[in-house]
Image (tube, helix red, strand yellow):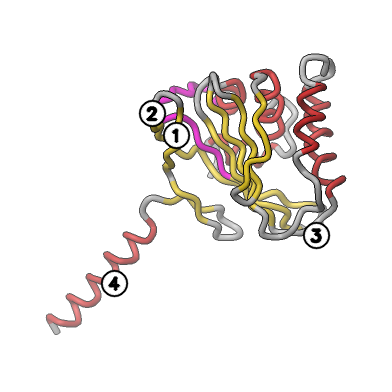
Amino acid sequence: MRHRFATAAMAVALLLAGQAGAIVESKTGTEYPDSITVATAGGDQVLVATGAALREKSMLKIDIYTIASWVASGTELGADRAAAIWTLEAPKRLRMDLRRSFSREKLIGAFREVIEKNYADQSAISTDLATFEGYFTRDAESGDVILFTYLPGQGLTTDLNGETRGVIANPTFVEALWSVWFGPQPVDDGMKAKLSGTER
């Protein structure tokens, strides 16, 4: 009997250990670490997760991608967490995990469409937007992982499947990109709430 209790207790402990240190997108079960470390010019920086979300398309609820957000540890986001993350001038990261294949045109068009809604005047970002779109030279494939990492003073780095595609220094473009999920007119209000941690 004592052995059975000990075995059960160990199983519970292992289950809890597996759940610790992660945030989970509820529908797909996709897990992301609740903290990550990025290298900066001033040394390693710990970022903490603000939330994870799923992008779905159409009434058929087709899964397009999951996404997670991290910001510098110790960041005070205040009452309007989404707005704070959107304009945050501190280390931050977004990770997209694609769950469906689609054309390059649809991928870059999705970014451009939302940015245009939030930025009627794109004169400050038009060159950078063209540069950014040039990073994506092929159709998107299920399983692709896209990282956007912003480090003040160093710029925005875009990585595709572990390969750095380029760095954009313009902080205004960083805000424009983050507006896709955190701006006044995001791609999806539900995603905005989940990514900013105001809804689980």
At a point 39% along the width and 58% down the height, the residue shown is 19
Question: On residue 39, which mark appears?
Answer: 1
Question: Separation of disc 4 and disc 2 at Cα?
Answer: 39 Å
List the residue tagged with mark 4: 11
At a point 75% along the width and 39% down the height, the residue shown is 135
Of the numbered discs 4 and 2, the one sitting upstream in the chain is 4
The mark lying in front, picked from 3 and 1, is 1
- Residue at the left extreme? 2
In terms of depth relative to the viewer, which is nearer, 125 or 32? 125
User: For the residue marked with disc 4, what is the amino acid?
Assistant: Ala
At a point 40% along the width and 24% down the height, the residue shown is 42
Determine whether the residue tagged by mark 2 lies in a helix, strand or loop. strand
User: For the residue marked with disc 3, what is the amino acid?
Assistant: Leu
Question: Separation of disc 3 and disc 4 at Cα?
Answer: 38 Å
At a point 50% along the width and 27% down the height, the residue shown is 91
Determine whether the residue tagged by mark 4 lies in a helix, strand or loop. helix
